[in-house]
Amino acid sequence: MNIMKVKTIAVLTSGGDAPGMNTCVRAVVRSACAYKIKVIAVMNGLQGLIDGDFHEFGPRNVSGIVHKGGTILGTARSKEFRTKSGRKKAAKNIINAGIDALVIIGGDGSFRGGHELNKDFGIPFVGLPGTIDNDMYGTDFTIGFDTAVNTAVQAIDKIRDTAESHHRLFFVEVMGRHSGAIAVESARAGGAEMALIPEVKTDLNALIKSIREQKDAGKKSAIIIVAEGDDAGSATEISEKVYKIVGAKGHVCVLGHIQRGGHPSARDRTLASRLGNAAVKALKSGKTNVLVGELKGSIAFTPVTTVVKKKKKADLKLEQLARLLGT
Ligand code: F6P
């Protein structure tokens, strides 16, 4: 496709919502308008493409959202889009609306959908990394991760007050079905004793040994961060197993979706604004089917074919550092 002819783009948010998605939508819409490109907002993610839920947006449609959590466009995990017939309906709507390319803000599942749509029907797109999980190849940070970690750390700080006052053992469960990124980062920043993550096989005996050793060394409380996808189970299950083995009663706190909500941090807003603008510039200059990310502080374009094949793993050095400093 001759991208110099890009006159109309569509923007959508897809998958789990993440703080900073709104900031990113704002950046895409206002950048496109500044470059005289028409913008269509698609409601409810990839499902909105199937439903033809399209609305033309101008700069005023994105007023007052720079600081708001969630996504004003709505989002979904569309089962129908995983079928070729669903994608066919979407492609028809996109072509009928005169949309030349899509900007998809979401996680790897959303890009897989965009990639399939491109393979089947030739619809070009660029992806922007919007997920709290920070598990996306091609960017050092995803939009929403910093805010989620800050939310988790604030909660850990509060739990610490009770843990220290009552000399208790706590298991705090954070999000990350397949990724330990939030767990290791919040464990380190929150001064937790340990992080149990899907990337590392959990050895409960080693965990118990470490809790005992720390107790013998004079520690009166402990906080263990558990990523929800840990192989040893949920925080509740791990706590029960530990209780059965050593009789040490752990208290459990599951942070859940509070990590996905709230005002985006300044860092997430800056990242979202920068990447949103870079995505529109990329389309203008003829780049399509890439993830627009930030690597070592610079804008980086990674082919979506690579992004959907590879997975970024949590930084295990952070996990080791958290463990070392938590002794
Ligand atoms: O991908 C973001 C995420 O928050 C994961 O950390 C979590 O496992 C999942 O979404 C939960 O999804 P849902 O809100 O659909 O249950």
Image: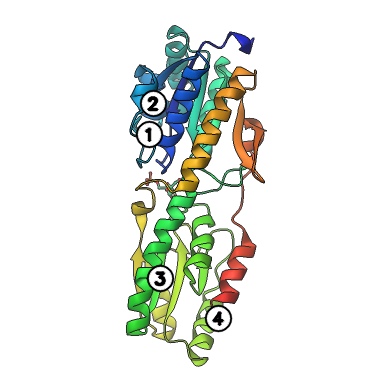
Give the residue at mark 1: 76
Q: Are marks 2 and 4 in contact (CB under 8 Å)?
A: no
Q: Single out the mark in the foreground, 2 or 4.
A: 4
Q: Mark 4 Cα within 10 Å, few/some/many (few <14, many 20+)?
A: some
Q: Earlier in the sequence, mark 2 or mark 4?
A: 2
Give the side of residue 216 with respect to residue 16, left or right: right
Q: Quadrant of the N terminus?
A: top right
Disc 4 marks which residue? 327
**Image disc number at residue 171:** 3
**Label 3 is placed on what type of residue?**
Phe
Q: Percent x, y for residue 230?
A: 49, 61
Q: Are marks 1 and 4 in contact (CB under 8 Å)?
A: no
Q: Position of residue 143 (x, y in %)?
A: 49, 42
Label 3 vs 4, first from the N-terminus: 3
- Estimate how packed mark 1 is, as few (under 14), some (14 to 19) or many (20 or more) residues with alpha carbons within 10 Å: some
Query: Considering the numbered disc 4 on the image, is that residue within a helix, a strand or a loop?
Result: loop
Residue 271 appears anywhere in the view: yes
Rendered image: mark on residue 47: 2
* Quadrant position of residue 19: top left
For the C terminus, the quadrant is bottom right
Judged from the image, the secondary structure of the residue bearing numbered disc 2 is helix
* Residue 290 placement (x, y as % from top left): 62, 29
Give me the C-alpha separation between circle 3 and circle 4: 16 Å
